[in-house]
Structures are given as C-alpha cells and as structure tokens.
Image: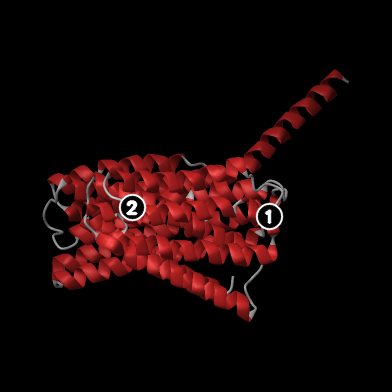
Amino acid sequence: MSTLELFFDLVFAFTLTQLTALLASRLSLAGVSQVLLIFGVLWWMYGGYAWLTNTRTPDRTPERLLMLLGMAGFLVVGLAIPHGFAGEGMGAAGGLLGLGYLIVVLVHTSLYYRLNRNIIRIAPFNITSALLVILAGVADGAAVYALWAVALAVQVLSPLIASPGGRFEIRPAHFVERHGALIIVALGESVTALGISAARNGVTGALAGAAVLGLALTACLWWVYFGTGDDDRAERAFTAASPGQRPGLALSAYFYAHIPMLLGVVAMAAGVKLTLGHPGQPEPVGQALVLSAGVALFLAGDAWFRGALRIGTPWPRLVTAGIALAAAALGATVTIGAQLAVLLAALVTMLAVERRLPAVTWPGRAAAVRARIARARSGRGRAEG
C-alpha cells in the first residue's frame, strides 16, 4: 500500500467525520436516513478506488495527479455533506455534493480504463448514480430522499447486472492491508471527535474519566479487528481462494461487511460527542442508543466479516452486540458513565472468552471433521480385515 493511498484514505475519512457531525446534529429518523444514504453512495466509490489501486499502484505522475483530483472531489463532497439534502432548506449548496461526487466517479473511470477496460461495464452505473445525486441537490421534499435511494440502488444492483467475477484480479495482501488501514483511520477520527467534544465542554475530572473510557472503548474495537489475528487469517483465506472466487469475497467481506463496521464507528463517535459533556447523568434515549448501536454495529459487521471468509465463529460477537444494545438503558436511566463502563466490560469479557475458544477457523474445522471420518473408515477397514 502506497503513501498516496493512505493520504487518499485520510481525505475520505473526512467524509466520515462530517457524517458523524450530521448524525449528532440531526439525531432523528430523517438524520439517520440521510447518513445511511450518503454513506452508502460514498462507500461504493471508495470501494471502486480500492479495487483500482489493487490493480496497480498509481506511481506515474499523470495517475498521481488524477488521484489528487479524485481526493479533491471527496473533499468537496465532505464539505457539502451538511447541505446534501437541499429540500430541508439547505439551499443550492446541496448541488455541490453531487458535483464533487461526479468528479470522483469520472476520475475513477479514467484511471481504471487505463488499466482494465472491463470498467466500461460498471462505469455507466456509477455515472448514473452521480447524476441522480446532482438532481437530488436541486430537488425538494420527498424527491430528495427518493433520488438518493435510487442512486444507491443503482450501485448496489450493478454487480448483479454486470458481475465482476472473472473480469477483475484481486491481490489479497494489498486488499486486506488497504481496508485495515481505513479501519485504523476511522477509529482515529472517532478519537479526534472525542477530544474535540471534551475540549468544548471544559475538562473536569469526571469528563476526563469518561473520555478515557471512550478511548478504551475505541481501543477494544481496534482489538476486535486487529488484536485477535483475524486480519492475518483473512489474508490467508483470501489467498487460498481461487482467482475467480476473490471478487465475490472482496464484495462480501470487504465491501458489504465493512458497511456496518464503519457506520458503527460513525454512530459511536456521534454518541460520544453528544454525551461526553454530561458523563455523570442520564441522557435522552436517542443519544444513549446511538452510542450503544455504534458498538453493536461494529461487532455485527465484524461477525459478518468472519463468516464471509470463514475465519472464526461469529457468535461471541453477535451476543456481545445484543448486550451493547441493552446497555443503552443504563445511559438513559442511570448515567452515561455507567453505560460506557458496561460497554467496555462487555467487550473485554468477549475478548477474554474468545482467547479460550479453540483457535480453529471454519475451513480448519471442516478439515478436522474430514480427518475424523477418514480415521473412522480406516478403523472399520482394519476391523473387517
């Protein structure tokens, strides 16, 4: 993975920060819908750039300049995210998001066409989606949501119409490293949101303690993804797959399964931002719920990731996700500090339990079953002889 790709990821992470701010300022069904729609459309094109750089590192001057132009498009998108739904009185600035997104799409198409002309099968869907986002920026009322929803649907359904299987080659090591780096950057952005919120509220002993709990919570999410060796097992499983299977695994494990993980980081950061100033008192149900939902989403996405690559049992993480959601009741009725403490305790307990579970991946478990069957058959053969 090149430093330019890491630079690109840092710019993309700015859009996640803006989505966090959007969710914190509009904690309602409408606000959640806006975050989901914007994230879904942007995540599709981030994935497109990940596939692009997986094909070849942009190491020539024209390619680097185009990558920087794509980054500029994402920057414009990030700046315009608070105005992405012009129908709510945000004015013509909503159209800037669509224009920035169109730049992102056109740069991606131009770069990819230089490497693999099969992009022509996907490019019309991406361009159509960008045009719909531009229309949404100048529309009003319910039409804004409808246009965003259609733009997202066009992207999500495109692999079913123009399947990538057999047309794109995947380098597993780069793919795993690229998405791992994004998770680290996203977690770092959540810590930044925590620090900014603490600074605005004035540092007290109680607030500093809650901030440390928030940092510990983020560290546990890092441990969930990196500290258990899943990233290494994922690379081995990805490498073991045939070239024809890899595009499907890339979509399942690194596109779809990472959606709840990144949305979880956004939700958790928004929850911390909303509640950190009052750690010693309960908060409205919505604020407590978004904090717990962030942790639960990350764990559910990671369980999905494990299942897609068959690298470990998902059940401890799914059970802990349920406990995380239940912990919202503490934040709404007792204190946010109590909720943070329970979330942290649940994650630490889960990680401790997983350390005691047999470190056998799903393919390994299948091989063990086959070995037992073979031994049984061999024993029967000797007995019959």
Q: Secondary structure at mark 2?
A: helix
Query: Residue 362's spot in the image, x, y percent?
Result: 60, 41
Q: Residue pushed farthest bottom? A: 61
Residue furthest toward the left? 281
Where is residue 262 drawn, in percent x and y? 41, 55
Left or right of 343? Residue 300 is right
Quadrant assignment for the N terminus = bottom right
- Model colouring: secondary structure
**In this rendering, the label closer to the viewer, 1 or 2:** 1
Crowding near the residue tagged with mark 1, few <14, some 14–19, many ≥20 C-alpha atoms within 10 Å: some
Please indicate whether residue 335 sits to the left or right of residue 112 in the image.
left
| Circle on res. 128 | none
Name the amino acid type tagged 1.
Answer: Asn
**Which of pointers 1 and 2 lies earlier in the amino acid sequence?**
2
Taking the spot 29% from the left edge, 62% from the top edge, the residue there is 92
Q: Pointer 1: what residue?
A: 118
User: Label 2: which residue?
Assistant: 35
Q: Residue at x 12, y 51 (%)?
A: 282
Q: Quadrant of the C terminus?
A: top right
Q: Amino acid at mark 2?
A: Val
Would you identify the image quadrant in which residue 222 lies? bottom left
The residue positioned 65% from the left and 42% from the top of the image is: 363
Q: Is residue 271 visible?
A: no
Q: Are marks 1 and 2 in contact (CB under 8 Å)?
A: no
